Image: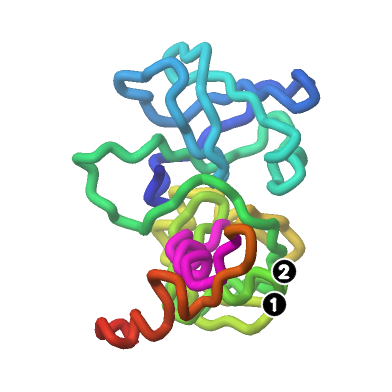
């Protein structure tokens, strides 16, 4: 589990085929304090398992599933990536709850300066639009951000200078592909409100949590 608060960037040192997927050798630009072999590190928002950890260098395997759903397969040797180590229970939750399981790839539609800030707009699959809401949270290449506005196939975020400096978001230009993870809470709420399947479909009204239950308990 992660927060979307990037610890630093890193560089892809090597890339090779491995077991139907890929293996990456990476180097972080920050110290990996008390590293644990097999720990989770989010690379551009993708939760990966680090091994062969030596100083700031480590190796990860990228499965065919991850390659099909993310931009990792398009990374070139020497490319920069955002990195975040897994959340500890004593850490501040500065961003939002991020699983590191990417939902889709989005495309930069536009980038415009707005005073000291930079306004980005992205296009993304309509099938995920119900999970993206104005002033809600979204993760772009592992970075926790707030949605300014959204439509059925696009959304905008405003990024502060600090974030552009300490992450790879400053490198984004029109047409760049990015990894997107929508807010996981919305997906769980939707799942609980959908009819259950137990031999035959149960109506939403018969489930334990439904719109009536939420209204009765003050959530609507």
**Near-viewer residue (174 or 90):** 90
Which residue: 63% across, 53% down? 179
Q: Does residue 120 show up magenta in the picture?
A: no
Apparent side of residue 179 relative to residue 191 in the rendered image (left or right): right
Q: Which residue is mark 1?
A: 153
Which residue: 47% across, 14% down? 53
Colour basis: rainbow
Q: CA distance from mark 1 to mark 2?
A: 6 Å
Query: Residue 69 location in percent, x, y?
Result: 71, 48
Query: Residue 11 location in percent, x, y?
Result: 58, 31
The vertical placement of 213 against 189, above or below, is below
Residue 168 is at least partly visible in this image: yes
Q: Does residue 196 show up magenta in the picture?
A: yes
Residue at disc 2, secondary structure: loop
Q: Which residues are magenta?
A: 181-197
Query: Residue 167 location in percent, x, y?
Result: 49, 49
Q: Label 2 neighbourhood size at 10 Å, few (<14), some (14-19), many (20+)?
A: some
Q: Which residue is mark 2?
A: 125
Residue placed furthest toward the front: 199
Which residue: 58% across, 81% down? 150
Q: Which mark is residue 20?
A: none
Residue 158 is at least partly visible in this image: no
Within the image, what quadrant is residue 131 found in?
Answer: bottom right
Label pair 1/2, CB-CB below 8 angstroms = yes
Residue at disc 1, secondary structure: loop
Which residue: 29% across, 55% down? 94
**Near-viewer residue (106 or 19):** 19
């Amino acid at each position: 589990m992660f927060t979307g608060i990037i610890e630093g960037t890193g560089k892809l040192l090597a890339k090779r085929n491995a077991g139907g997927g890929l293996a990456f050798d990476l180097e972080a630009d920050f110290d990996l304090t008390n590293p644990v072999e097999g720990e989770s590190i989010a690379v551009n928002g993708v939760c990966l398992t680090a091994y062969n950890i030596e100083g700031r260098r480590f190796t990860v395997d990228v499965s065919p599933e991850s390659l099909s759903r993310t931009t990792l397969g398009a990374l070139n040797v020497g490319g920069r990536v955002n990195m975040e180590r897994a959340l500890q229970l004593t850490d501040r939750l500065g961003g939002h709850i991020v699983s590191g399981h990417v939902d889709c790839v989005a495309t930069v539609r536009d980038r415009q300066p707005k005073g000291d800030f930079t306004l980005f707009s992205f296009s993304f699959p309509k099938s995920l639009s119900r999970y993206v809401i104005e002033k809600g949270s979204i993760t772009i290449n592992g970075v926790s951000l707030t949605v300014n506005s959204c439509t059925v196939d696009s959304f905008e975020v405003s990024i502060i200078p600090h974030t552009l400096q300490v992450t790879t978001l400053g490198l984004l230009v029109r047409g760049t592909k990015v990894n997107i993870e929508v807010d996981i809470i919305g997906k769980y709420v939707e799942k609980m409100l959908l009819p259950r399947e137990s031999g035959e479909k149960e109506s939403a009204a018969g489930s334990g949590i439904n719109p009536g239950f939420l209204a009765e308990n003050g959530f609507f």
